[in-house]
Image (tube, grey):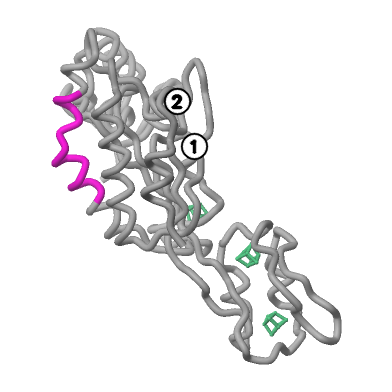
Amino acid sequence: MAMIWAEEAEEAVCKVPFFVRRRVKKHVEEEAARSGSGIVLLEHVHSCRKQFLEGKAMEIKGFQIETCFGASGCENRAVESDRLVKELEALLAERNIGAFLRERVSGPLKMHHEFRITLSDCPNACSRPQIADIGIIGARRPSMSDQSCLACGECVQVCREGAIEFVKGSGVRSLNLEKCVQCGKCLDACPTGTLREGARGRRILVGGKLGRHPQLGKELKGIYPDEGVPAVVERCLEMYFRYSEEGERLGAILNRVGCQAIIHEASHR
Ligand code: SF4
Ligand code: SF4
Ligand code: SF4
């Protein structure tokens, strides 16, 4: 059952960066429970902050997998990620990134050292996969079938990217895949099957990060089926283990050695 938070404790924890806020809140709630309090108070936030500064707060396991809220019933969801998340969690746990980082990083491990994979179930990208070591975005790419078009315009109504070339009275002429973000909304809207699913899977970005030199992840070419994603993650981890000198983020490594190896081996349809 969710704990009740005092207003000032809630305000204090809102200042924590969004990508670790969920974990920090959980830790503060555990601290409150340990102290026998039924309500989370500011003193629990301060106590956790002190522990964190002393480097003994949260267990640093070496990696984090974040998701969006698609699984809680978001209507925009293009793909489901539950199975893929479990698979990636097992893969990262098996590679023991925590032990690797403890060897490479001088001083105590901090959360910002952890290898981060972030999934979003549609191109709205609410969980911010662009700034993760590996960002994974759900995608459904439309293509045109032989079914005749009713010229109803439903697909044009739902496409926010202006990616559908439509002529009133005669219907859809073509799709502009340069503009299309592969959200799949037009597929759900089309009553005739004139627009059909050309590909379903994941867009993958590598090397995103925040910090002193922030950068967005670079997108690999194509859409990857779920079963192809772990191989890309493995490839990124190989680069990470081979080239990481002191536990720097994947993006910093790719800036140094280039991401040709990943792009070359991983590019998909
Ligand atoms: S990324 Fe898409 S599916 Fe996930 S919560 Fe946001 S809008 Fe919903
Ligand atoms: S998939 Fe989304 S962006 Fe692409 S054409 Fe359809 S509605 Fe537009
Ligand atoms: S492609 Fe489908 S949704 Fe779009 S105008 Fe034709 S019939 Fe309507």
Residue at label 1?
217
Please provide percent x and percent y for residue 58.
Answer: 22, 23
Image side of residue 164 versus residue 108, left or right: right
Instruction: Look at the image and say whether residue 118 sits in the magenta stretch.
Output: no
Please provide percent x and percent y for residue 5.
Answer: 37, 31
Q: Give the residue at x 21% y 25%.
A: 60
Front residue of this view, candidates 249 and 29: 249
Q: Is residue 51 above or below residue 210?
A: above
Instruction: Look at the image and say whether residue 93 sits in the magenta stretch.
Output: yes
Q: Secondary structure at mark 2?
A: loop
Residue at label 2?
17
Marks 1 and 2 in Cβ contact (< 8 Å): no
Front residue of this view, candidates 264 and 176: 264
Q: Give the residue at x 23% y 9%.
A: 106
The stretch of residues the image draws in magenta is: 88-100
Q: Is mark 1 within 8 Å of ligand 1?
A: no
Image side of residue 188 versus residue 10, left or right: right
Q: Give the residue at x 48% y 62%.
A: 77
Please provide percent x and percent y for residue 240.
Answer: 29, 30
Q: Is residue 213 visible?
A: yes
| Tally of numbered tags | 2
Please provide percent x and percent y for residue 29.
Answer: 26, 30
- Label 1 Cα neighbours within 10 Å, binned few <14 / some 14-19 / many ≥20: many
Q: Is residue 142 above or below residue 239?
A: below
Q: Secondary structure at mark 1?
A: loop
Q: Amino acid at mark 2?
A: Pro
Cα distance in 3D space between marks 1 and 2: 19 Å
In the rendering, which numbered label is found on residue 87? none
* First-in-chain label (1 vs 2): 2
Between circles 1 and 2, the one closer to the viewer is 1
In terms of secondary structure, what is the magenta stretch mainly?
helix
